[in-house]
Image: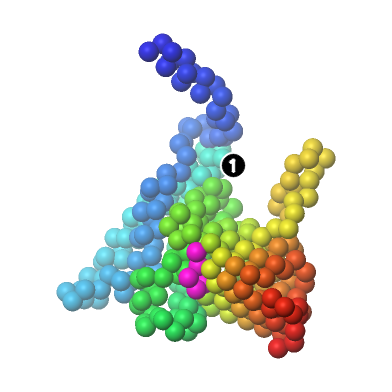
Amino acid sequence: MKNIENIIGELLKNSFDSEKIICTFQKPYPDKKSVAEMMNEIYYLIFPNLLITEYTNYKDLEDLLLSKTNKIRKILDEQVKRSLCFKCKESECKIQVNEIVENFFKKIPEVQNKLKKDVIAIYNCDPAAKSLEEVIICYPGLKAIFYYRIAHLLYEFNIPILPRIITEIAHSETGIDIHPGAEIGENFAIDHGTGIVIGETCKIGNNVRIYQGVTLGAKSFPLDSNGKPIKDIPRHPIIEDNVIIYANATILGRIVIGHDSIIGANEWVTYDVPPYSKISRFKKAKNI
């Protein structure tokens, strides 16, 4: 037993420095299980039709959504507090949490409108989709976009860790990896989706369609004087409006894919592509 105690002591000693948590009350890390529960409730808030049964009337639905909103608020309040512990003091945290939670709910109708457009975009680009409800209930691409849009909203509030937890939950469930810092426009469609990677500083315009296995990544990482990668610099592609990127295409670096272009399957692109181009396996930048 003494050996076990020694091992535990060594593990604690060698762990990351807990003093990096500034809050005096030393809140624990954000809880992934609670965050996943919160996201499930937000999905119903965004798509309340999922709650309708043959016995549901409007008043019941309204009451049910109010109950879910209160549950979301409680979880979000706690998880934001835990996340903000990594950047502020206790008194500052309390003020920020209230503001963030209020602003979050004010933005939810805007997020809902974007997601409704995403649903229609996915439905329109997939002949196998028989209804909008099928997209909402079944499609992993929409689920990944939903998680991203909520995470991006929290990312814009400068909350550490929590947005990344949200997108990593989606990553584990769908195989689609979208960093919460990416900027994605309206009518975004992911078809199939498994293996898609979208980096932190990527910018995607409106009416963009992406298929499985696509990587929008960094070409290289500039190093500082200590040989470590420089963070927080633009390093991922800019995808303009009305672009289609087919399966397993890899687009790397801070390059621009011009509007109304098509990137063919399995292409490796590390150069700017002018608007109205078609990149195929055998011909580069052929005018459409």
Quick one: 217 or 195, which is closer to the camera?
Answer: 195
Q: Position of residue 61 (x, y in %)?
A: 26, 71
Q: Position of residue 159 (x, y in %)?
A: 55, 50
Residue 287 lies within the magenta run: no
- Tell which residue pokes out farthest to the front in this image: 282
In this view of the protein, can residue 101 be seen by the observer? Answer: no
> Which quarter of the picture shows residue 14?
top right
Q: Is residue 113 above or below residue 152?
A: below
Residue 193 lies within the magenta run: yes
All told, the count of numbered labels is: 1
Q: Position of residue 216 (x, y in %)?
A: 64, 64
Residue receiving disc 1: 87
> Which quarter of the picture shows residue 48?
bottom left
Quick one: 89 or 163, which is closer to the camera?
Answer: 163
Q: Please identify the quadrant where the C terminus is shown.
A: bottom right
Q: Residue at x 55, y 72 (%)?
A: 211
- Tell which residue pokes out farthest to the right in this image: 225
Q: Secondary structure at mark 1?
A: loop
Q: Please identify the quadrant where the N terminus is shown.
A: top left
Q: Residue at x 45, y 61 (%)?
A: 174
- Magenta range: 190-194
CA neighbours of label 1 inside 10 A, class few (<14), some (14 to 19), many (20+): some
Q: Is residue 121 left or right of residue 250?
A: left
